[in-house]
């Protein structure tokens, strides 16, 4: 009988050691994940800086990186200042801002709705911006900042409509995606109807915008987008605090005290606004929001939404695509959306093929 307390004490000590080992293992895994996340973020940022420098230096007037830096710091002659500061710098900055907004928007949509097809350019958000903007431009001759505001209003209206149509005592990701695809198709038909009724030259200009283009963009597009992102990014960071509970499911989130539907609505509103302001600045640049988040999650496995990495990936993707759009073909500047579609369309086909194999048991 005297051995019983000693046995119990040994068992308790063994349990405590196992618990301590588990805590150390979890801490080590988290530390490795955090280090990889920081390294990937730093690598993406470094790549972004390199491509940014290249985009400022190449063109009809090629400049070495030293001269580019000198010009950015206030030196250089009048010609280099005009080329770098007025032509190339606003375009490169706009590519970064547009890509970051689309990448972050796509990551939020796909994480909240837990569906890889939940991207603003596939579920009708970009189509809403396009429908209102094209209608305003071709039928009411709206231009400039008012046209950008109409695109933003269209994306927000489309997002609200899709959310309400998908509501059934809450919003399920699969239902919202299907509703969004249907609404997007209807809105796209409005775009083509308006273009068919317009003059050929006006329709051609609208088609160029619909392809997603940075050609001819200047500081007048950069500052409104920068201001909008200065407001939306902090709001998205605050709303993203609800992501972890939402990833566990509504019941688990409610058990943790989180208001699941309110958090989901706030995140979707932020993601819709991000897609709207990016579309207003450069048009519906296709597939950036769709592919940026999956790339980021592959680079940082196990880190959930990987929102910062998705934003950096989107920025790098658009900047590289715009560089290719400007210089891939001699004497021709393609819309950046053409290049991003060449990247995103095969990925969409691959995703659908995988889904079909899983659905078919193969």
Image (tube, rainbow, N blue to C red):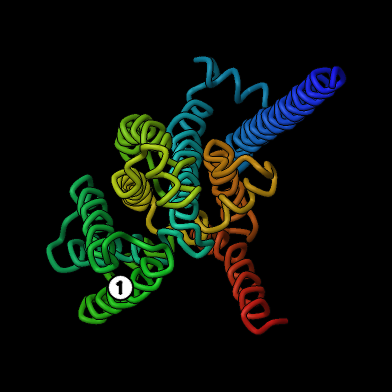
The foreground one among 141 and 124 is 124
Q: Is residue 360 depicted above or below 53 in this figure? A: below
Residue 156 can be seen, yes or no? yes
Q: Is residue 48 depicted above or below 28 in this figure? A: below
Q: Residue reaching furthest front?
A: 1
In this picture, residue 122 sits left or right of residue 51: left
Q: Tell me the crowding category of disc 1: few under 14, some 14 to 19, or many 20 or more residues within 10 angstroms, Cα based.
A: many
Residue drawn at point x = 69 percent, y = 44 percent: 299
Q: Quadrant of the C terminus?
A: bottom right
Instruction: Provide the residue designation for mark 1.
Output: 183
Which picture quadrant has residue 44?
top right
Task: From the top left corner, tell me how far across and down residue 9 is, in percent.
Answer: 79, 19
Q: Residue reaching furthest left?
A: 140
Which picture quadrant has residue 57?
top right
Task: From the top left corner, tell me how far across and down residue 139 is, in percent.
Answer: 15, 68
Q: Is residue 89 depicted above or below 248 in this figure? A: above
Task: From the top left corner, tell me how far across and down residue 222 is, in percent.
Answer: 37, 37
Residue drawn at point x = 84 percent, y = 18 percent: 6
Residue drawn at point x = 34 percent, y = 50 percent: 268
Q: Residue reaching furthest bottom?
A: 360
């Amino acid at each position: 009988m005297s051995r019983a307390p000693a046995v119990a004490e040994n068992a308790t000590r063994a349990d405590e050691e196992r618990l301590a080992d588990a805590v150390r293992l979890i801490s080590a895994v988290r530390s490795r994940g955090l280090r990889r996340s920081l390294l990937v973020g730093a690598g993406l940022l470094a790549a972004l800086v390199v491509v940014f420098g290249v985009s400022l230096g190449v063109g009809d007037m090629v400049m070495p990186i030293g001269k580019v830096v000198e010009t950015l710091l206030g030196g250089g002659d009048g010609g280099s200042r005009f080329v770098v500061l007025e032509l190339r710098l606003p375009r490169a900055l706009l590519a970064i801002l547009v890509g970051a907004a689309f990448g972050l928007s796509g990551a939020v949509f796909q994480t909240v709705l837990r569906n890889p097809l939940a991207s603003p350019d596939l579920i009708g958000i970009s189509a809403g911006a396009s429908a209102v903007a094209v209608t305003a431009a071709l039928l009411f001759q709206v231009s400039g900042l008012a046209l950008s505001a109409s695109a933003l209003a269209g994306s927000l209206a489309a997002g609200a409509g899709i959310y309400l149509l998908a509501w059934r005592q809450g919003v399920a990701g699969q239902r919202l995606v299907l509703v969004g695809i249907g609404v997007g198709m209807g809105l796209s038909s409005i775009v083509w109807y308006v273009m068919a009724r317009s003059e050929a030259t006006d329709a051609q200009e609208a088609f160029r915008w619909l392809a997603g283009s940075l050609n001819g963009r200047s500081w007048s597009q950069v500052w409104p987008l920068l201001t909008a992102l200065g407001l939306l990014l902090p709001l998205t960071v605050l709303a993203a605090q609800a992501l972890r509970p939402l990833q566990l499911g509504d019941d688990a989130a409610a058990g943790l005290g989180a208001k699941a539907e309110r958090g989901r609505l706030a995140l979707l509103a932020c993601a819709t606004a991000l897609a709207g302001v990016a579309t207003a600045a450069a048009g519906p640049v296709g597939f950036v929001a769709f592919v940026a988040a999956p790339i980021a999650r592959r680079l940082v496995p196990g880190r959930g939404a990987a929102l910062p990495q998705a934003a950096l990936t989107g920025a790098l993707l658009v900047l590289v695509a715009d560089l290719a759009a400007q210089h891939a073909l001699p004497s021709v500047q393609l819309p950046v959306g053409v290049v991003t579609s060449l990247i995103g369309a095969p990925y969409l086909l691959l995703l659908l093929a995988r889904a079909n194999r899983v659905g078919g048991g193969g």
